[in-house]
Amino acid sequence: MMLSSRRLFVSVLLAGLGTGLVGCKKKESAGAGPSGAGEASKPIVIGHYASMTGSTAHYGQDTDKAVRLAIEQVNQQGGVKGRKLEVVTLDDRGDSAEASNAVARLIDVEKASAIIGEVASSLSLSGGRVAQRRKVPMVSPSSTNPKVTEVGDYIFRVCFLDPFQGKVMANFARNTLKLESVAILKDVKNDYSIGLADAFRAAFTGAGGKIAVEQSYSQGDTDFSAQITAIKGSGAQAIFTPGYYSEVGSIARTAQRLGVKVPLLGGDGWDAPDLVKIGGDALEGSYFSNHFAPDVATPKAQKFVADFKAKYKQEPTGLGALGYDAAAVIIEAMRHAPNLSGDAIRSALGKIKDFEGVSGKITINGERNADKSAVVLKIVDGKYKYETTVEP
Amino acid sequence: MTVWGRRAAIAIGALGVIYGLGFAAEATLIEYVQRIVLLAGINVILAVGLNLINGTTGQFSIGHAGFMAVGAYAAAFFGVKIAPLVHSVLGEGALANGVIFNLALVVGGVFAALAGLLVGAPSLRLKGDYLAVVTLGFGEIIRILFNNATFLGAATGYFGDDPTGLPAYTTFFWVYAWALAVVVAFANLTFSQTGRSLGAIREDEVAAEAMATPTTRLKVLAFTLSAAAAGVAGGLFAHMQAGIRPEDFRFEKSIDMIVMIIIGGLGSISGAVLGGIFVAVTLEVMRDLQEYRLVLYALLLISIMLLRPQGVFGTRELPSLLRRMVKR
């Protein structure tokens, strides 16, 4: 039988596929727990859509772990309104059509009462439009673009905005570090990076500083020597490079190789364990703004770090802290809402004031954004060290 | 009844059926399923369009996401800008929206066709791998242009002037009416004299040239029409998604489109239709598998390619297959 080897291979593949299907199905039904009769004993579903795969999988996975931790802790305390909570996470592969599909599925199939998502602002915009149209409240943990909550009155967030972070770093550079002239190196492919750069430029020049030179790159670039050479000749005392961690690491290495000894400044896009892995000692003495500091934290934050480490055997990132806060804010709103309709949860979310979150005190303002403080971290010996807190 | 009268009657009948089905779909299906059905229709347009150049003509393009992007942005931008004018003439309502949407889609198709002409005219003198690399490059260039176009929202994407995004014009009726029109038009082209010449180019370009077939001109024609279909699909996608980002038209999207036509059978329009639906539905059906769905999706593709290397339909079409089965 000459043909059979191919047939055999295919049948083995299909058999694997089949067992995979059955195995995963089982796992999911086990997670739901024993469900009694009637609506009141069923768990309340909180949907989470995130990029669990793809180039920003790190962000989605960090956030999801923290969301699950928050829900688990609430369930140990008896849940909300006498009902347990359940998280359903759907992957969007970092694709906006899939993000919208995922939100539609969370609402239609999983019957989510509230939705958490996304990290990337453009995906929050896509998913948020579906949530808004269907009147299901959505809380974005870490989308910092101002447009996200402008979609409508069902869309909230628990992080600060791009302009605020740019302003924080500009004031820090001008007032604390006493810098006269700073270079900007931004990622033109990334709306987040552009937003921070714009805000930084406005605040820094407004405070009497000078932008020595402005250079750009595109996400995915690996060679930054041309940009760093241009910055080297400009006499800048620091480089503000508000990109994502993968490129920032390479930028730091390039700067070190070309003998540029000024510190790098950045935003919360730096916050990933891989940053120091890629950048190494080239990042020593650099500063970035973030949502919380793991080393100097409130009791609540310390407990979060300890619990997260105990469960996942790794340090939580700032995105994790925000994911935890997004879940906590939704739970708080559900407790205070008279019932679990979208409208009731939405009104309760709008009334959140001085809520003690892991990433600081959260007050939801009239634009459904969070008023909260930012911290500046310094990289010392490959670790993040708390430098200062900046109030809004 | 004249030939044209009969054709018009068939067309009106078909549109009526689509309208009825669409009405039923919107009344009964949940939004999640509706979205998948709409995406499937959009994929059909993409696949049938790409099949003309990659399958029928045998010139491998791996940059069609770029043309989809051109169509999506052109349709979205034009639709937003023309809406006040049309509304002032026709008032608000379904009629005005239909007019705006279809004008926008035509503009999207025309712009994508122009982009296709621009890319195709110089590069279709190349063959095989070289052409593939050039189209890949152009696809990326187009995407990066949008990434830097601030009046189109740069990296954030274009969401129109309204904070709730582009108007949701894309309905079941419009998607499938356009899909039907594209399928019929491309099928007629494929089985015309021009289509046979395109097939001749695929089989042996030198021989076709020797038989006085204007190969370059025909290749550019096929490429341009194919880009136009991608543009219309882009316009439908934009008004379904309420916004478009350059990142939605990455290289992976071009690969998705190639998977559609290879699964269905390179050179078969029926295959392209099937492949388009397959790609839209499969990943969503496997949602329960969480992250493993991408692994299984890849395994599924490998299995199909091992069992049927020529794709489900090969180069055959559904009608001829049915006829053979009836004869047996």
Image (spheres, helix red, strand yellow):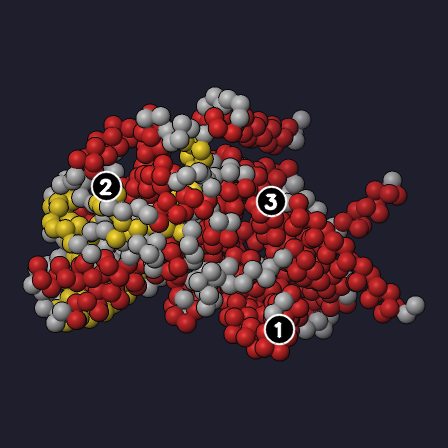
- The residue that mark 2 highlights is A356
Is label 3 in a helix, a strand or a loop?
A: loop
The chain ID associated with circle 3 is: B
Residue B118 x/y as whole percent: 54, 74
Is label 1 in a helix, a strand or a loop?
A: loop
Q: CA distance from mark 1 to mark 2?
A: 51 Å
Does any portion of residue B172 appear in the rendered image?
yes
- The residue that mark 3 highlights is B30
The three-letter code of the residue at mark 3 reads Ile
Residue A112 x/y as whole percent: 47, 39
Instruction: Mark 2: give few (<14), some (14-19) or many (20+) Cα within 10 Å.
Output: some
The three-letter code of the residue at mark 1 reads Gly
Closer to the chain start, of discs 3 and 1, is 3
Residue B171 x/y as whole percent: 63, 57
Residue at image point 55% right, 57% down: B240
Q: CA distance from mark 2 to mark 3?
A: 38 Å
Residue at image point 32% right, 34% down: A70
- The residue that mark 1 highlights is B91
The three-letter code of the residue at mark 2 reads Glu
The quadrant of the image that shows the N terminus of chain A is top right
